[in-house]
Image: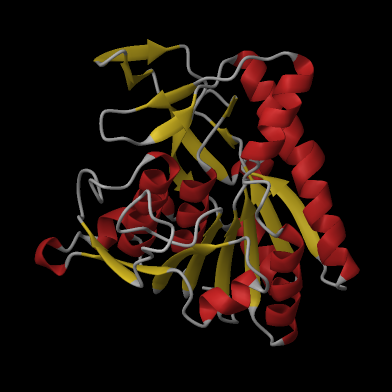
Amino acid sequence: MTSKPLTVVKCGGNPAVDAAGICADIARLVREDRSVLLVHGGSGEIGRLAGRLGVPQRTLVAPDNVSTRYTDPDTLEVVILALAGAVKPRLIAELARHRVPAVGLTGMDCRMLRAQRKSAVRSVVDGRTVLVRNNLSGRITTVDTGLPRTLLHAGYVPVVSPPAIDEHDQAVNVDADRAAAALAAALGAEELLLLTGAPGVLADPDDPGSVQSSIQISPTGAPDPSARGGMALKLIAAREALAGGVGSVRIADGRIPEPVSRTLAGAGTTVHISRAESPNHSSREREIRR
């Protein structure tokens, strides 16, 4: 663990997410002598840049309703350019405006995030489940905490995004929510805040007012059958963080004023794993800690 309480914040890539508000709140936490690690995605910027460059985008929907980005070589290039070249510099500049010393990183730096490339992924196409190959994405297997620990101990805010590095030392796209979960678990974070373009986990996906203050999810399989698309993946990330020993995980609205402060005060949804089938924490910790 770091010497100070650690909060890991995931800034969602939805363009409506208030990144400036998140950075202002992070500055407040730093002034309160807390350590903060910021993880970000950039779906909006990836889509915008892909459109400008004429790179077609494709979404894969797994049988359990989890949606992911299909990453061919051109899309991987767009992902790296968008995250490391556009989103991250804006976040670093915003934190600097609040006098917060921040360092921008990808999962490839010092091999911080190692991933196993997926040889094929299952996707539902026209009602049939098919295997999609040549997808340059991976699943995080290990986290080397040396670099982020050094930065946190020195008082810096690491700002981290995909890609990770695979078993062949090549870049692979990984989900940013799951990267945040892996980092939070490996670093012994007290809390993980997943800030997104939704008010929290909805009891009715079609009713924005049906936010659940807390939710129990299954320790295996689909965490919540009613969750769709990106929210299903966020619940998987939450489960992985909790299984890795993170104290608490909240999924909350990143579009509201003071999003971090309000989430810490109870906004959004607190995620719990069903106690009836509590997972083995130590095995997950061994998987991601080095």
Tell me: 210 left or right of 81: left
Residue 95's quadrant in the figure?
bottom right
Q: In the image, residue 144 lies at what x, y percent?
A: 54, 51
Q: Is residue 246 visible?
A: no
Q: In the image, residue 27 lies at what x, y percent?
A: 75, 75
Q: Residue at position x 47%, y 75% from top?
A: 190
Q: Between residues 154 and 259, which one lies in front from this camera angle?
A: 259
Q: Between residues 227 and 6, which one lies in front from this camera angle?
A: 227
Q: How many marks?
A: 0
Tell me: 36 left or right of 90: left
> With respect to residue 161, does 6 lie above or below?
below
Q: Residue at position x 70%, y 56% from top?
A: 159
Tell me: 88 left or right of 238: right
Q: Between residues 136 and 127, which one lies in front from this camera angle?
A: 127
Q: Is residue 271 visible?
A: yes
Q: Between residues 54 and 256, which one lies in front from this camera angle?
A: 256
> With respect to residue 152, does 85 lie above or below?
above
Report the colour scheme.
Answer: secondary structure
Q: Residue at position x 46%, y 60% from top?
A: 186
Q: In the image, residue 16 lies at what x, y percent?
A: 66, 51
Residue 147's quadrant in the figure?
bottom right
Q: Residue at position x 69%, y 85% from top?
A: 33
